[in-house]
C-alpha cells in the first residue's frame, strides 16, 4: 500500500470557468442587444414607418407643389450617421418653423402624424386687414400687425407709421396698441364716411377720410369716447353735409378744435 498524500492546509482549488457562450447571462444580454437593434431598425430604418405620403391643405396663395417639395427636403433626419424619413424622427416643431420662415404669409401650421406613413400639414394663411406704406413700398398687413406680402389691395385703406424702418416680410410692423386703435377706428368711424389713410405717431393717430377731411385722435386717452365725441360734433354742429368743408378735427384735448374751409362763391 502506498501512503496517502496529505493535502496541504489552506490550499484551495478553483473551479474551471464556463465558456462565455455557456453562460445564461451572455444569452440574456445578447437577446436584449438584438432586440434593441431590431427595434431601432424597425422604427427608424425599415420601410414600415418611412414617411411616404404628405397631405397639405389650406393653401390659398401658396403653390402647393412648391410647398410639398420644400417639406420633402426638410423631413429627412440623420440618426447614427444614417439618413431616415421615419415618422418617429420628424420634428414637427422644426418643420413648422421652417414653413413659417419660408412663407411669411403663413399664420399657423398644424402638423399631425398619421401612422404608419403619412404626415398631414394644414396651413392657415394670413388675411389682410389693411395696406401698409413703408420703406417706399406697399404691403399687406394682417390682424397681428405683420406685413406678409408686397401688394396693394384697392379695397383696403392705407396705414402709415412715423419712423418706419426695415420693412421685411414677416415683421410685426404695428404693435398691439396700434392694432387695437386701428380696429376701433375702423369699426366706429363716423357712419357712411370712408377711411382713406390712418397714420400713427408715437402719441396720436391721424385719419384722412375719403372726402379729404382729417381727424386727429390721442392714443393716450379713451379712443372710444373720442369717436363718440366725433359723431356728436358732426351731428349737432358741423352737420354731415358740410364734411367736405372740414380741414381738420382735433379730438386730443378736453375742448374739441376744428377748422372749416371758406365757402366758395360763384
Image: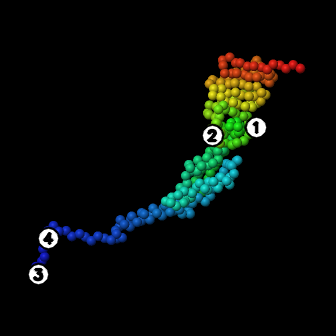
Q: Nearer the N terminus, badge 1 or badge 3?
A: 3
Question: Gap in Å between the C-alphas at discs 2 and 1?
Answer: 23 Å
Question: Gap in Å between the C-alphas at discs 1 and 3?
Answer: 123 Å
Residue position for label 1: 155
Q: How packed is label 2: few (under 14 Cα within 10 Å), some, or many (20 or more)?
A: some
Q: Secondary structure at mark 4?
A: loop
Residue position for label 3: 2
Q: Residue at x 54, y 63 (%)?
A: 46
Q: Residue at x 12, y 77 (%)?
A: 4
The image position of residue 110, as x and y in percent, is 60, 48
Q: How packed is label 1: few (under 14 Cα within 10 Å), some, or many (20 or more)?
A: few
Q: Residue at x 68, y 17 (%)?
A: 255
The image position of residue 72, as x and y in percent, is 61, 56
* Label number found at residue 171: 2
Question: Gap in Å between the C-alphas at discs 2 and 3?
Answer: 106 Å
Q: How packed is label 4: few (under 14 Cα within 10 Å), some, or many (20 or more)?
A: few
Amino acid at each position: 500500500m502506498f501512503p496517502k498524500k496529505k493535502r496541504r492546509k489552506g490550499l484551495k482549488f478553483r473551479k474551471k470557468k464556463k465558456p462565455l457562450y455557456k453562460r445564461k447571462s451572455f444569452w440574456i444580454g445578447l437577446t436584449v442587444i438584438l432586440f434593441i437593434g431590431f427595434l431601432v431598425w424597425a422604427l427608424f430604418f425599415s420601410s414600415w414607418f418611412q414617411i411616404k405620403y404628405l397631405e397639405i391643405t389650406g393653401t390659398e396663395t401658396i403653390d402647393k407643389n412648391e410647398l410639398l417639395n420644400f417639406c420633402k427636403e426638410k423631413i429627412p433626419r440623420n440618426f447614427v450617421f444614417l439618413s431616415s424619413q421615419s415618422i418617429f424622427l420628424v420634428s414637427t416643431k422644426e418643420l413648422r418653423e421652417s414653413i413659417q420662415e419660408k412663407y411669411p404669409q403663413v399664420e399657423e401650421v398644424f402638423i399631425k402624424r398619421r401612422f404608419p406613413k403619412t404626415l398631414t400639414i394644414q396651413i392657415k394663411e394670413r388675411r389682410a386687414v389693411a395696406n401698409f406704406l413703408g420703406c417706399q413700398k406697399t404691403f399687406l398687413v394682417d390682424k397681428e400687425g405683420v406685413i406678409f406680402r408686397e401688394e396693394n389691395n384697392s379695397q383696403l385703406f392705407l396705414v402709415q407709421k412715423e419712423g418706419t424702418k426695415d420693412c421685411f416680410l414677416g415683421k410685426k410692423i404695428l404693435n398691439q396698441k396700434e392694432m387695437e386703435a386701428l380696429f376701433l377706428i375702423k369699426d366706429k368711424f363716423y357712419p357712411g364716411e370712408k377711411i382713406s389713410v390712418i397714420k400713427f405717431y408715437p402719441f396720436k393717430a391721424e385719419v384722412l377720410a375719403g372726402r379729404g377731411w382729417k381727424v386727429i385722435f390721442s392714443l393716450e386717452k379713451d379712443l372710444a369716447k373720442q369717436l363718440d365725441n366725433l359723431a356728436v360734433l358732426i351731428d349737432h354742429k358741423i352737420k354731415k353735409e358740410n364734411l367736405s368743408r372740414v380741414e381738420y378735427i382735433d379730438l386730443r384735448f378736453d375742448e374739441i378744435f376744428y377748422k372749416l374751409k371758406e365757402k366758395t362763391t360763384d
